[in-house]
Image: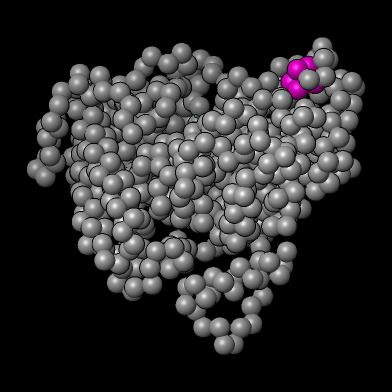
Amino acid sequence: MGALYGAFHFLRLLQTLQPIDKLDVSQKPRLQLRLLDHWDNLDGSIERGYAGRSLWDWKALPENVDSRLRDYARANASIGINGSTLNNVNANAQILTAEYLRRVAAIADVFRPYGVKVYLSARFSAPIELGGLKTADPLDAEVAAWWKQKADEIYKLIPDFGGFLVKANSEGQPGPRTYHRTHADGANMLAAAVAPHKGVVIWRAFVYDMKPGYDRAGAAYENLQPFDGKFAPNVLLQVKNGPIDFQPREPFHPLFGGMSRTQVIPELQITQEYLGFSNHLVFLAQMWREFLDSDTYASGPGSTVTKVVDGSLYHQRLTGMAGVANTGTDRNWTGHHFLQGNWYAFGRLTWNPDLSSRQIADEWIAMTLTHDPKATETIARMMLESHEAVVDYMTPLGLHHLFWGGHHYGPAPWWNTEPRDDWNPVYYHRADAEGIGFDRTATGSNTVNQYHWPVRGQFSNLSTCPDRFLLWFHHVPWDYRVRSGRTLWDEMTLHYQHGVAWVRATRKDWDALSDKIDPDRHAAVAKKLTIQERDAIWWKDACLTYFQTFSERSLPAGVEKPAKTLAEYQAKSLQW
Ligand code: GCW
């Protein structure tokens, strides 16, 4: 594997025109488990997938293995990824049947030469569904024996099987709590089944139960933090980067820095569920950098998420990072040419979580699009500015979850019809005549308490809370003066306008590169940018028209008037 990684490094040096005359390179990956999670269903669809169908053709396997699987494994190896969870965390137990395991083994055979191990999402109730047992209680001896036998069966077919990924007691998935057992009981029982084979269990922390007056942002911490130090040595806890759900911007999840005796690994979302699907150009390295650089202050200043994750702070035995894949059967893999850059960036950051977004962008541009210095400068700027711009036109100043229900494409801040409060945008923005934002300080839910000092103090205090998290932590009056000296309302409208202006300017910049990029890809990206411009305007207009019904303030100079009425935005359904 070292030789393979070395070869890919060498190719990268060539492709990025680096000198190779005095090569003396010594590197090792900083994280051990460098994983892509696929939310692929057995029927070939992909939950939150926007680049075609699943790459795994279960009907054709194991006899026929699509040659693209080799390309996929090789691409992953070239960026350092060494594991792939094949199926959705909303898991179907069928994947664990003998019939499917033979197919999984065929995929594992193709991945093996590239150092990519296969993992599976395990449905916690599989002993009932497949084994005919009456229970899936993790403390039941028959249940534990069933999983042990299942693990033995898997390892016979796939000796280097990575292990199980589990979404338990979350969004309708079964789990140990169904049987009045704890998350640790559930994880450790599965861990015992794979331990003799050196497998791992990756337990997800995305758990949130609705209860009266609760703040979803605090739920995962409340549910999982009490189990710090209680997980078996081969269990990793997979925590989303932020406390809600892959929003365009979130503060770091308080479980990073909250579990010093647990092997915590981040889950990032490469696929753009809340970021315009595969239509919007957004370079996620920028967002991930912000996350990894966040200081948790868990052991004083400098306790960054990177240090929590790479083992330098807590010296855990196993480290890793998982990304929810954005790949599919689309010819360009990711639906939008630029979004290959996010797959690339994720891999590079698992190898070295200190890489700068600029370096990653430069590498990707040189290896993918052009060596022309001026064009590179323009494209790198587009990529590096893109995340802030998308946040501006979707959810500026700490707003979050303003998305259309269900599919999550486009704005619907008025949405209030989901069965659970915390699936509704109105639950998150709380706009009223006085102001807007979710009070998570002592006067509100107080989940800001889950952070260490001085982060807690910084976020709690309106005057020290960074603008980018203002409405995440505070309910702020419309006329409150933000750092710029403008009122909150004016500031918000200008952020939306800036997002739109950025997409317009970016379209022009891209158009000007037509002689530098091959015509097919240039045209494909140009077309996507027209969709992004349309959507940015839609976001700005729908959000401002709606929020204006509360603020009752006019739009400041420089902010374009929405073309339609609120009723028209509310009637508009999905467009992509
Ligand atoms: O945000 C939600 C998504 C679900 C997803 C879930 C999770 C796989 O809308 O589609 O389910 O997160 O991460 O488990």
Using the image as rendered, state which of residue 257 and residue 424 is in the foreground.
424
What residue appears at the point 54 percent right and 70 percent down from the top-left corner?
A: 12
Q: Position of residue 99 (x, y in %)?
A: 77, 29
Looking at the picture, does residue 213 appear above or below residue 166?
A: above
Q: Position of residue 478 (x, y in %)?
A: 22, 32
Q: Position of residue 576 (x, y in %)?
A: 33, 34
Using the image as rendered, state which of residue 192 and residue 429 is in the foreground.
192
Task: Look at the image and say whether residue 188 sits in the magenta stretch.
Answer: no
View extreme (bottom): residue: 21
Q: Is the N terminus in the top left, top right, bottom left or bottom right quadrant?
A: bottom right
Using the image as rendered, state which of residue 221 and residue 380 is in the foreground.
380
Task: Look at the image and say whether residue 128 sits in the magenta stretch.
Answer: yes
What residue appears at the point 74 percent right and 31 percent down from the top-left corner?
A: 100
Secondary structure mostly taken by the magenta-highlighted segment of the chain: helix
What residue appears at the point 61 percent right and 83 percent down from the top-left corner?
A: 23
First to last magenta residue range: 125-129
Looking at the picture, does residue 562 appear above or below residue 485?
A: above
Q: Position of residue 52 (x, y in %)?
A: 48, 38
What residue appears at the point 25 percent right and 31 percent down from the top-left corner?
A: 543
Colouring method of the image = one colour
Residue 186 in which image quadrant: top right
Res 12 visible: yes
Q: How many marks?
A: 0
Please indicate whether residue 332 sits to the left or right of residue 502 in the image.
Answer: right
Using the image as rendered, state which of residue 194 and residue 426 is in the foreground.
194
Looking at the picture, does residue 239 appear above or below residue 503?
A: above
Res 236 visible: no
Please indicate whether residue 223 sits to the left or right of residue 574 in the image.
Answer: right
